[in-house]
Amino acid sequence: FAVIFILDNFFAVHAHEGKAGHEHTMLAAEGQGERLEKHSVWAAYIGLLIHTFFDGAAISARVLASPAAGILTFVAVLSHKVPEGFSMSSIFQAGRFSRLHAFAAATTLGLATILGAVVIFLSGHSEFSLIFLALATGSFTYIAGSELVPLVSASRDRKGTMFFLLGIVLFYLTSILLSKVGLK
């Protein structure tokens, strides 16, 4: 949790207000249309590539610690892989890259997830995998607490709140079902 907090607050690049009240974003200078600068595209790609590697590592670390928790983590990670791929493709296309580049970028995100899972799985139930388990748990907790819960809470539309609560209920029911079939 603390590691992600520090990275997010000291090293992450966000759109923010400048000293003179001008908004700084990843968008190119005005007059060039709605497109992203190439360096911003690559920064987003590298960030998501690292993120997806850790997604895969989290899955394997959880499977090694508890098969049931691993299945739940797999479902949680899988649920945001398609939107991640679409986001990465959109970022590449907004940077005026070809559709082939956009597709390749989205594909490599999926491959990074698999690579992360394989690296941790091959390490076995070791101190190395436990470190990744701790990092994954802390980062998921930080993201939920600092991004997801405030976003849902601030919304005037209660559909988001209902989906958030439904996700918690489905997670709980799935964990009960997995324990009934012998996975703990």
Image (cartoon, rainbow, N blue to C red):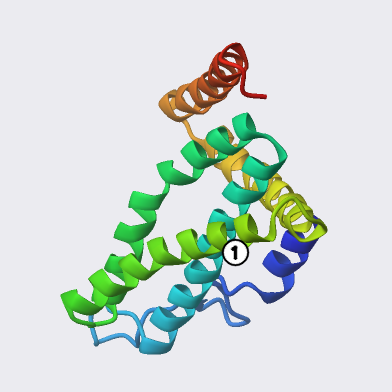
Q: Position of residue 23 (x, y in %)?
A: 49, 75
Residue 25 visible somewhere in the drawing: no
Q: Is residue 60 left or right of residue 112?
A: right
Against 73, residue 158 (above or below) is above
Q: Is residue 32 left or right of residue 16?
A: left
Q: Residue at x 72, y 67 (%)?
A: 9
Label 1 sits on residue: 119
Against 10, residue 64 (above or below) is above
| Residue type for callout 1 | Val
Q: Residue furthest top?
A: 180
Q: Residue at x 66, y 49 (%)?
A: 61
In the rendered view of the protein, which quadrant contains the C terminus?
top right
Taking depth in this image into account, of 1 and 181 the one nearest to the observer is 181
Taking depth in this image into account, of 24 and 22 the one nearest to the observer is 24
Taking depth in this image into account, of 156 and 113 the one nearest to the observer is 113
Q: Position of residue 106 (x, y in %)?
A: 32, 66
Q: Position of residue 50 (x, y in %)?
A: 55, 69
Residue 29 visible somewhere in the drawing: yes
Against 117, residue 89 (above or below) is below
Indicate the quadrant where residue 157 lies.
Answer: top left
Taking depth in this image into account, of 140 and 136 the one nearest to the observer is 136
Q: Is residue 72 left or right of residue 99?
A: right
How packed is label 1: few (under 14 Cα within 10 Å), some, or many (20 or more)?
A: some
Q: Residue at x 52, y 72 (%)?
A: 47
Against 71, residue 110 (above or below) is below
Describe the element under mark 1 as helix, strand or loop. Answer: helix
